[in-house]
Image (cartoon, coloured by chain):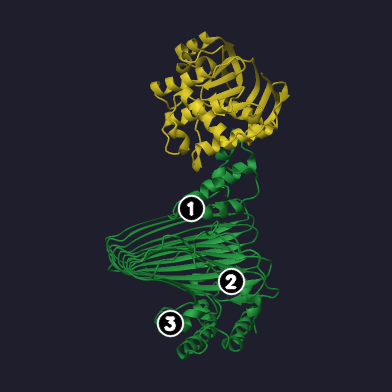
């Protein structure tokens, strides 16, 4: 599904990722944990194709194809989805408009017919119902006036509608109280599927109580320092990141 | 002799030969008014950046181009279809002017209720000379700018809307000025009058649209009276031709408990200036002066507004948003004057500009002059670029970059468009904004013209 090989990334000439190797198989959930400033967010943005990151070495192979240098919209069309840590507010553009544009762009990319209004409404209804999200959220402008929890649920809704094969959740748990986090985790669990891989980027172990990962990696100083199963997360919870030369924030 | 003074001469010299053909040529008072106008224009000269009110806008085309008054032949230029702003007019009244000339064959009377009078300036000068004299005489103003003086001298076209006390017009009235259909540079000077009686209500949309590539000067003046308790929605779209210069001076007087709502969209023309001054003359008077400008190439757009709060308990709201690409330039000057007695004034002003290119420039100048001590006035001006994070957000969902940029521009301008209270007009103006955007394919249905 996803093979990252010896990935080196710099921002403004400063090396952030210094040789990442990561292999994610279909259906797997991998958690990437690490202290602040370890490069977790950089990794997630680079996979999704954000401008401003210089790949100085290595490759990102997704479904056998090299993603390096590919536009973010093309990556999205190929099934990569990034749930933002801070979802962006877009006044004046309704959630439905945004989702319809996104979904139809992806359809066009694959040479499929765009959804007509009826089909689109049907997909929307189905997904909001499935995730227990109120339909009025769709009519509102993208993330405008949304609470922290609503913004994250909106990310999960977008993910459900765009139906990616690789979902990267960048600190989706940050800023959420325990109830909101449970709701979001429940949403993610509903989207677990044999053909879908999920990369969970998180600072804290607590999200992993609700979304059980197949593998856990510790990212620090731009490298993956240790990999293990869910027990590694518990160990980190106990000891913090001190072992990796950083104090837990 | 400088180019500028040569050109003042060109304007002045065109006055004499033209005057016998101008509307109301037989009226003595108007003759005197016109002569006074041309004299004052000659004395004042063209505005230059030396004047504070013209600090950021230079009237280069007026210095360089020898505009000639339009002739009736220009007015008969072939026009296959009327470029209407509002969709299918249905029962909507519509007036059409081509190269400054009335074209009654394109007019639609619409379903106007009794007590609403919509006519060409030329006709009203014949049918109600005294009524119009009362207004033109007093509104002309000795202290008016030189371009208003030029308009007073040369006014050769325009419309008059008079709504009697208590009469409400539901449907928007559209007035279309088509320019650019001449081979030589021409000038025309519409003079419009809108007078709403006590408790009257009307919506007027002016569409200044350029066809063809001709250089022309449209020097318009609109004088407006909103009577006690009346409501005027006054919208304007400036989509002039590439080489056009568009000058529009709007002077509105708003009486007790009356509302004047205006929105001005600028999306064309080489040089445009919208100068709006509103006098809130009665308690409870309110004005909303809003607008948006989208410029590219080397276009220049100037929005200069003055709101005078003359009495207590008056309110104003002003929202302008602009998008500037390439080497385009815009000016926003928003002056709010709260006079000594105008206690409890409530004023709000916002001007935001989005720069899409490093070569674009905005000069924004809010000016609050407050002489009363119990008032609430706030203003804000901000300039920024497209939010890269928002762009990435949209693209990461599969939205192609060009479309994502358009959505963000629409989102930005949307805040100003929301201020338009008439739904039909808001949609029509939104469509104009969408039309302005670079072709990015696959626009959302909500934004697509029907």
* Quarter of the rendering occupied by the N terminus of chain A: top right
**Element type at mark 3:** loop
One can see residue A127 in this view: yes
Q: Position of residue A196 (x, y in %)?
A: 60, 18
**Residue A125: where, in percent of width, then height?**
49, 28
- In the rendered structure, find residue B225 and report the number of the disc placed on it: none
Q: Is residue A173 visible?
A: no
**Residue B61 occupies which quadrant of the picture?**
bottom right
Asked where in the image residue B254 lies, by quadrant, the reply is bottom left
Residue designated by label 3: B128
- Labelled pair 1, 3 in contact (Cβ < 8 Å): no
Side (left or right) of B348 relative to A47: left
Q: Do discs 1 and 3 share a chain? A: yes
Q: From mark 3 to mark 2, how far is it between C-alphas?
A: 23 Å
* Of marks 1 and 2, the one in the foreground: 2
- Rendered shade, chain A: yellow
Q: Please give left or right for residue B136 compared with residue B339 in the image.
A: right
Which residue appears at 61% of the width and 53% of the height?
Answer: B435
The residue to which callout 1 is attached is: B417
The vertical placement of A49 against B27, above or below, is above
Write down the colour of chain B. Answer: green
- Element at badge 2? helix
């Amino acid at each position: 599904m996803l093979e990252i090989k010896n990935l080196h990334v710099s921002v403004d000439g400063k090396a952030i990722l210094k040789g990442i190797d990561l292999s994610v198989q279909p259906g797997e959930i991998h958690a990437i944990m690490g202290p602040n400033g370890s490069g977790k967010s950089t990794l997630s943005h680079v996979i999704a194709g954000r401008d401003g990151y210089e790949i100085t070495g290595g490759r990102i192979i997704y479904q056998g194809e090299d993603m390096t240098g590919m536009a973010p919209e093309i990556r999205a069309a190929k099934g990569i989805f990034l749930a933002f840590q801070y979802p962006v507010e877009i006044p004046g553009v309704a959630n439905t408009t945004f989702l319809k544009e996104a979904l139809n762009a992806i359809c066009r990319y694959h040479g499929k017919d765009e959804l007509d209004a009826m089909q689109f409404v049907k997909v929307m209804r189905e997904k909001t119902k499935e995730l227990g999200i109120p339909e009025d959220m769709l009519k509102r402008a993208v993330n405008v006036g949304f609470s922290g929890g609503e913004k994250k649920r909106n990310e999960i809704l977008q993910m459900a509608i765009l139906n990616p094969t690789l979902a990267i959740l960048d600190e989706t748990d940050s800023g959420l109280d325990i109830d909101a986090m449970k709701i979001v985790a429940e949403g993610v669990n509903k989207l677990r599927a044999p053909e879908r891989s999920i990369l969970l980027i998180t600072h804290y172990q607590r999200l992993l109580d609700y979304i059980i990962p197949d593998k856990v990696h510790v990212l620090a100083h731009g490298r993956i320092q240790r990999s293990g199963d869910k027990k590694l997360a518990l160990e980190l919870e106990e000891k913090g990141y001190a072992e990796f030369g950083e104090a837990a924030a | 002799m400088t180019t500028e003074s040569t050109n003042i001469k060109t304007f002045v010299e065109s006055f004499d030969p033209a005057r016998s053909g101008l509307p109301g040529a037989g009226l003595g008072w108007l003759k005197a008014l016109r002569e006074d106008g041309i004299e004052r224009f000659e004395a004042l000269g063209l505005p230059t950046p030396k004047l504070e009110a013209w600090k950021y806008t230079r009237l280069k085309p007026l210095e360089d181009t020898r505009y000639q008054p339009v002739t009736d032949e220009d007015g008969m230029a072939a026009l296959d279809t009327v470029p209407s702003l509002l969709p299918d007019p249905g029962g909507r009244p519509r007036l059409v002017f081509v190269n400054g000339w009335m074209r009654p064959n394109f007019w639609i009377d619409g379903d106007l209720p009794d007590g609403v009078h919509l006519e060409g300036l030329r006709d009203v000068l014949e049918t109600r000379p005294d009524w119009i004299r009362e207004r033109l005489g007093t509104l002309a103003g000795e202290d008016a700018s030189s371009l208003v003086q030029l308009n007073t001298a040369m006014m050769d076209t325009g419309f008059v809307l008079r709504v009697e006390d208590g009469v409400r017009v539901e449907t928007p009235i559209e007035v279309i000025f088509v320019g650019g259909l001449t081979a030589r540079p021409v000038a025309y000077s519409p003079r419009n009058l809108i007078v709403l009686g006590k408790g009257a209500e009307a919506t007027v949309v002016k569409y200044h649209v350029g066809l063809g590539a001709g250089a022309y000067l449209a020097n318009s003046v609109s004088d407006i009276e909103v009577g006690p308790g009346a409501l005027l929605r006054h919208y304007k779209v400036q989509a002039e031709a590439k080489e056009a210069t568009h000058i529009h001076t709007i002077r509105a007087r708003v009486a007790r408990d009356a509302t004047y709502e205006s929105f001005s969209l600028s999306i064309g023309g080489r040089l445009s200036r919208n100068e709006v001054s509103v006098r809130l003359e009665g308690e409870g008077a309110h004005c909303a002066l809003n607008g948006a400008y989208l410029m590219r190439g080397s276009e220049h757009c100037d929005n200069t507004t003055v709101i005078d709060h003359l009495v207590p308990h008056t309110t104003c709201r002003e929202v302008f948003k602009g998008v500037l690409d390439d080497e385009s330039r815009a000016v926003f000057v928003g002056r709010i004057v709260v006079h000594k007695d105008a206690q409890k004034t409530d004023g709000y002003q916002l001007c935001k500009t989005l720069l899409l290119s490093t070569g674009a420039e905005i000069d924004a100048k809010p000016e609050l002059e407050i002489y009363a001590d119990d008032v609430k006035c706030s203003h804000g001006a901000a300039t920024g670029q497209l939010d890269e994070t928002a762009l990435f957000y949209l693209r990461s969902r599969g939205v192609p970059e060009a479309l994502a940029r358009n959505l963000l521009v629409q989102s930005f301008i949307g805040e100003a468009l929301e201020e338009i209270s008439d739904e039909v007009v808001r949609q029509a103006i939104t469509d104009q904004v969408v039309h302005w955007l670079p072709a990015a394919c696959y626009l959302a249905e909500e934004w697509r013209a029907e």
